Amino acid sequence: MSEVSRASRRCFFAAAVGFAAAVGIAGPASAQDAFKFGLAMPLTGSQALYGQDQVKAAEWAVSEINAKGGINGKKLEMIVLDTQADPQLGIQMTNRLVSVEKVPVFITAWSSVVKAVAPIANDNKVVELSIGASSPDVAKLGDYVYTTFPLADIDITAVAKYAATVIGKKKAAVIYINNETGIVPAEVYQKVFKAAGGQIVAVETYDPKATDFTGLLLKVRAANPDIIHLQGLVADIPQVIAQMRQLGLTQPVTSYSAAFNPKLIQQLGAAAEGVIATSLAPGPEDSEKVKDYVARWQKDVGREPNGLPYTEYLYDAPYLVAAVLKALDDKKEPASGENFRKEMLAMHSFALPITGKTTLNEDHTVVKPVYLMEVKGGKWTRRAVIGE
Amino acid sequence: MLDPTIILQILWTSLATASYYVLFAVAFALVLKVTRLFNFAQAAIMTIAFYAAFVAVQWLAWPAWAAFAAMTATTLTASFALERIGFEALRKRGVSVMFVFVFTFMVSEFVDYLAMLIFGTWPQTIFPTMFWPVTLVGNIAVSAWDLPAVGATIGALALLFAFMRFSRVGQFMTGVADNPDLAELYGISKRRIFLVTMLIAGAFSGLGMFLYGTRAQVLPQTELSLMLFAVAATIIGGIGNVAGAAVAAVILGVIQNASILVISSEWQGFLLYIFLFLAIIFFPNGLRLPQRRRFVTTAREVPVEQGAPAAESKA
């Protein structure tokens, strides 16, 4: 037994030495010529379509930062790992970023992954930047988890207030999908609409597997609202609106970023007219920078990116990381996770190249402008910008 | 809420949307009746059918009739391959029913994953538009999708009934369903009948997906959840009773939609599971109407295996 233990110890020691030599554990990034940060995204699997484009956007930003001299002459190095949008794999990759690559900050996305890896970030005092997950829960994941992507309640608050005060609707109906995408935002909408002086006349929900919405829409019709807010998923929003119009509900419809896509207009035709949705990132018509960015996609890749707004946030993320690392370097402070967090919160406001001003709050939320888009004449047009 | 217009509207829409559920349920029940397989690979056939039609319309810009023909051809080919490469090989190896059951799940998951890799996770419809114009009949909104869907379903059911009743192959299917070994003694090729059954089920699944995909968006995982409804209808309609499954699909659809008149909408989806639970616990042989005399006589004359419908009929 003791022979076995000694042999095991020797093996373990040899393996540990070999491992340390192989990965070059020589200290944190601050001591070397490059500043490292991590990016854990789905590069394979069902979500790769979006993940790969987001990584490409971040890679462009890192190249540009380095082309302009990096961080005080030191290179910014992005370690990209594949999560497949799977929490288990996300944990493995995060452990590698934290323990092997020794990054002070890493970026990740997809709510299940963001939530699963949060304890690793908190335990190791490494900053996790969530970019894309919009559940309000993201703000409650611990001291080291922050988001640069606005959480769901920001745009819902904006659209509810806008409906009651600017459009002047007094009676609203809320229809939502019965899962985490729908429940909390529907509550937020009701609260804000009522606080703005409106009245909620109907609240109906549907099962994520529902394929027909006649019954609940007839109930909404019977309540005779002035406006209808729909909080569903990309998969069901067009069908709910189609059935709404078929059943004679002609009221204006508001929704959120899931409704803001060109396919909605293609699928609904004239029935899409007047639908108002939110966008959390500017479109090509809002800014020359976005126009150039989309043109670059067309030129380099031959198409628009999948999930344009998300790629805009991913493009901006290395700029935020670089700004914080530069501030630390200017102060000659080591780029540890603790220092990164402290400096990021001290700076708290960042002028990012594409999505614009980004303010990180102490309560782990972020303030960004909300773009209200409306279908007019068969295309999405900007109706208002709230919080610019 | 108990306005007659509302009740009639719910009834009409439920009947119209029951069209694809009926087709899925009949496909599932028919395979179960003849081959005694819980064929969850039907979801894979449905996925293939939908994306075949989608590619024909949206990628190749083919007209609807050509897309339907391409979808049918692809679906029949996939059904043929599933039967010959999959089920027949497993039967020859004499594997257990449970093993085949697991195989069908594996096939459906495999095709789902493949579809996700090829077509992504963005929901799709067969035609670019999914909005169907509406005509008011009285105060009831009848969409341009409703009548063709109901008509196609009734037509398909009538053809199946005529085929089973009047064609020799159809009668052989009934014979194989009752007792495959005895049927073979009478010179009926089980192999051929199993193949015909899979092809008919494939055609029904394809038609159902064509109807569904022209009205709602589809993700690679959609088909498996649609299957659950077919399974519930098959169990409630009585295992081995194809007509019972069709009727159960209509009734389930109507009850589920009409339930909103008395319960909160968030409980609508849950109803299906309640029906399934009650059916499995209290009515494992389905809710049955009194049997007709002629059927009972057949049951007495032909010994059947456990689980076949005739064995469960009460004399």
Image (cartoon, coloured by chain):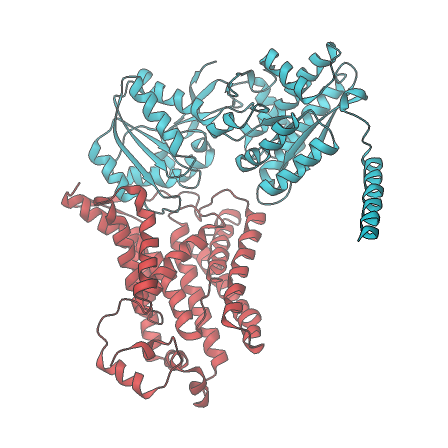
Chain colours: A cyan, B red
Q: Is residue A274 visible?
A: no
- Judge by depth and name the residue closer to the eye, A322 or B271: B271
* x and y, in percent, of residue A214 in the image: 28, 44
Left or right, residue A8 beside residue A159: right
On the image, which quarter does residue A152 sit in?
top left
Q: Residue furthest top?
A: A331
* x and y, in percent, of residue A242 in the image: 34, 39
* x and y, in percent, of residue A37 in the image: 70, 26
* x and y, in percent, of residue B28 in the image: 40, 65
In the rendered view, tell whether residue A12 sits above or below residue B202: above
Quadrant of the drawing holding the C terminus of chain B? bottom left
Left or right, residue A1 beside residue B38: right
On the image, which quarter does residue A202 sit in?
top left
Q: Residue furthest front?
A: A2
On the image, which quarter does residue A240 sit in?
top left
Q: Residue drawn at (48%, 83%), measured in percent from left and top? A: B189
In the rendered view, tell whether residue B173 sits above or below residue B123: below
Q: Residue furthest bottom?
A: B186
